Amino acid sequence: MASDQTDATVRLSDLRRAKAADVSFENLLSALTSKLQDCARLAVFEYEAGSEGHADLALAFHDLGLAERDSFRLLLDHLRRHLDELPVQVPPERERFSGGTAVGKS
């Protein structure tokens, strides 16, 4: 899961740098970033509680981690839908091309 979190964090930061659209988009990215951090932290808490012999507490952290991952997936679905609703922005280098050939060339 750690590599998934790192990959997802990189992708989230790429989206944030793109400065896509609106405050809701920024809020989604912020919430997703927090969820990733919470999931990682809860796994550590679960391990530490188990290592100290607190099985009930370890189970509570485990269950909370599952709930956090579920809420992360929900927010990620909303992010996908939000991105699908954004207007497509053509990068400047692509604007020079029309129908597979460069504008001004035949």
Image (cartoon, rainbow, N blue to C red):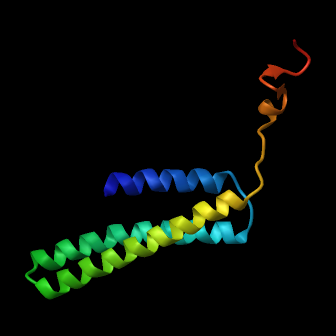
Farthest residue in the top direction?
Answer: 106
**Residue 84 pos. (x, y %):** 67, 57
Using the image as rendered, state which of residue 72 and residue 2 is in the foreground: 72
Residue furthest out toward the front: 99
Report whether 44 appears left or right of 9: left
Instruction: Please state the horizontal and vertical placement of residue 30, each as a whole percent of the image.
Output: 57, 69
Q: Give the residue drawn at x 19%, y 82%.
A: 59
Name the residue furthest right. 104
Q: Quadrant of residue 90?
A: top right
Percent position of residue 72, x then y? 45, 70
Question: At which x and y percent is residue 97?
Answer: 82, 26
Up the image or down, 93 lies above or below 15; here it is above
Q: Which residue: 74% across, 66% down?
A: 22
Q: Quadrant of the N terminus?
A: bottom left
70 displayed left or right of 96: left
Residue 53, relative to residue 103: is it above or below?
Answer: below
Compared across the picture, whether 84 is left or right of 10 comes to right
Q: Tell me which residue sits at (81%, 26%) in the image.
A: 99
The image quadrant that residue 38 belongs to is bottom left
Most distant residue in the left direction: 53
Residue at figure coordinates x 62%, y 63% from the top left:
81
The C terminus appears in which quarter of the rendering? Answer: top right
Numbered-mark total? 0
Q: Is residue 70 above or below residue 101?
A: below
The answer to whether 31 appears left or right of 40 in the picture is right
